[in-house]
Image (tube, rainbow, N blue to C red):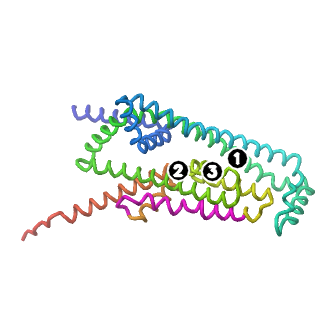
Amino acid sequence: MPNNDRLLVQLLLLALFGASLWVMAPFWSALFWGAVLAFASWPLMRLVTRWLNGREALAAGLLTLIWMLLVALPLVWLGFNLADHIRDVTLFIKDVQVDGLPAPPAWLSGVPLVGERLVRFWNTIDEQGAAAMAAIKPYLGQVGNWLLARSAQIGGGILDLTLSLVFVFFFYRDGPRLAAFVLSLLERLIGERASYYLDLVAGTVQRVVNGVIGTAAAQAVLALIGFLIAGIPGALVLSVVTFLLSLVPMGPPLVWIPATAWLAWKGEYGMAIFLGIWGTFIISGVDNVLKPYLISRGGNLPLVIVLLGVFGGLLAFGFIGLFIGPTLLAVAYSLLIDWTASKDKRPDTPSTP
């Protein structure tokens, strides 16, 4: 009978744990990013706490306010502007379905080699009118729906960002107690190697953070060089925007593609071609090389493991996979190394006659 009671208690605890995870499921993304941000900036938290004579709650509130001003407000402004432009494009697509194409822009005929052909193609589509619109109407609807979906994703990302900055405050304030709890939990699960694996996860996350920030800084410098060569006004401001957008996937093209289009609109086709090539192969291309290299530095992981973790994590989990992928492979690789080492050290048992 006592065994039955114990089994019932274990089942109830398991059900309670599963229900708790289900309740927290909508906030996993915000919790994860809040934890990563708090962990990456923890040295700054300790410094501010010393300045404030050990008042952790005040230091946590001050740092959270700084993150709100430096990160949240610019990204919220950028997100709402992108959402407005997406709505404008969607309305334009609907107008095209009803009224047809407007007159071709003046700069279209000035495109080298193919300008006149593009104008004739534009006029042909406009002359065909309803027939052409009927042919491409399903595709225009799909484009409009895709743009609306991206607008909704931008809104969801802004909400996640706001929640993650709220969670940052609690991670700052209760960080040491949470770390002690995780360590005690791991000690119950895996014994004396708990501290080693906790340090392994912490080191991997820190290297990923360093890799992301280092790559963003490199992309910002390369963007500044390209903008200065191409004669883009406000090159320094655009490079800062490139740094901020480099922290998210496919962020830098949101800066250099409009700059390339602006050069083409101004008639500077040579510089537009240069900036397009520079942006594609230099600004955006360095991300695929520099980020895995920076993540692999300072650790004992082979570079191929880091590459698989970075790209596999991105494909499997999205941007969060940039942290999850290398961490999972680092822990798995270390477990295999420990397992093979312990097997090699195991003494051979003498065979009985």
Q: Residue at x 41, y 40 (%)?
A: 44
Distance between mark 1 and mark 2 Cα atoms: 20 Å
Labels 2 and 3: the sequence-earlier one: 3
Highlighted range, magenta: 273-301
Q: Does residue 243 appear left or right of residue 335 in this picture?
A: right
Distance between mark 2 and mark 3 Cα atoms: 27 Å
Q: Tell me the residue that label 3 is attached to.
A: 236
Q: Residue at x 62, y 56 (%)?
A: 224
Q: Tell me the residue that label 1 is attached to.
A: 147
Q: Is residue 287 magenta?
A: yes
CB atoms of marks 2 and 3 within 8 Å: no
Q: Amino acid at mark 3?
A: Leu
Question: Where residue 161 sits: x, y (%)?
Answer: 54, 39
Q: Amino acid at mark 2?
A: Phe
> What is the chief secondary structure element of the magenta stretch?
helix
CB atoms of marks 3 and 1 within 8 Å: no
Could you say which is closer to the camera, residue 301 or residue 74? 74
Q: Tell me the residue that label 2 is attached to.
A: 319
- Packing grade of label 2 (10 A; few <14, some 14-19, many >=20) is some
Could you say which is closer to the camera, residue 17 or residue 100? 100
Vertical placement of residue 2 versus 278, above or below: above
Vertical placement of residue 156 versus 307, above or below: above
Q: Is residue 218 magenta?
A: no
CB atoms of marks 1 and 2 within 8 Å: no
